[in-house]
């Protein structure tokens, strides 16, 4: 019931591709993450994911198109759809997704974060 | 799978306290709403609600305290908790909440919007 200030939370971590939980409601998590560089191709079999750009910009690649997202824009990636985020420079993202969501979906590996920390 | 630009969507409506749907994922809606003035006391028996300030500021009143929210801040109101938003000047809000959520919760009346429009 207390408020959350996004910039204060973003100041608490620096590692890229390492999502942090900042809120929970209705079985969903609100997460913050910093992207820089290229992630891996993956999909989520069950969970839809929302990416909201708080600062900066990035490209969401699908297999058949790529979409540039700027500050104040969001995109919803439906479950089952392969995607790969890429950021030329650091970008600050707010994620909204089911608490069950693992960042690397169906392609676990070195970038997988099984249990993100609360900050 | 296409992106949504919040400011472009906010430009599409002007009525206060009249939420518009701009996204859906995992049974949840992403809504935009403009507040100005005072809403009514209400609660939601089932749904938790998240209020994210895109522009401006407002006060979330609970029965035992009030919290000022500024741009880039959010608050999650758990189900069952009475609350009343108040905005001295117009504020632009992004809401995350279950698709079943009715804006006035347990106190339906003239401000109720049963079926928000998609924009």
Image: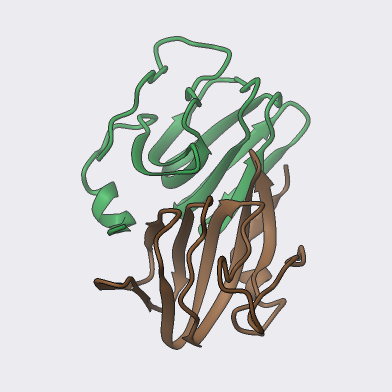
Chain colours: A green, B brown
Identify the residue shown where x is 77% and y is 67%: B117
Q: Quadrant of residue A46?
A: top right
Identify the residue shown where x is 54% and y is 20%: A40
Identify the residue shown where x is 21% and y is 44%: A12
Q: Is residue A84 left or right of residue A25?
A: right
How many marks on residues? 0
- Is A64 or A102 nearer to us in this picture? A102
- Is A105 or A24 nearer to us in this picture? A24
Q: Quadrant of the C terminus of chain B?
A: bottom right
- Is B43 or A75 nearer to us in this picture? B43
Q: Is residue B79 left or right of residue A49?
A: left
- What percent of the width, then of the height, locates residue B66? 28, 74
Identify the residue shown where x is 66% and y is 52%: B99
Q: Quadrant of residue A118?
A: top left
Which residue, as the protein is rendered here, is positioned at the far left? A12
- What percent of the width, then of the height, locates residue A69? 59, 50
Q: Quadrant of the N terminus of chain B?
A: top right
Q: Is residue B32 above or below residue A105?
A: below
- What percent of the width, then of the height, locates residue B90? 49, 86
- What percent of the width, then of the height, locates residue A58? 53, 44
Q: Is residue A40 above or below residue B33?
A: above
């Amino acid at each position: 019931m207390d408020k959350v200030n996004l910039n204060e939370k973003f100041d608490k971590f620096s590692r890229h591709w390492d999502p942090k939980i900042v809120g929970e409601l209705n079985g969903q998590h609100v997460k913050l993450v910093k992207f820089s560089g290229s992630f891996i191709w993956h999909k989520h079999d069950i969970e839809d994911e929302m990416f909201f750009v708080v600062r900066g910009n990035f490209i969401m690649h699908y297999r058949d198109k790529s979409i540039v997202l700027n500050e104040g824009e969001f995109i919803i990636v439906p479950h089952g759809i392969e995607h790969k985020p890429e950021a030329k420079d650091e970008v600050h993202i707010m994620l909204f997704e089911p608490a069950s969501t693992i960042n690397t979906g169906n392609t676990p590996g070195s970038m997988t974060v099984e249990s993100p920390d609360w900050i």
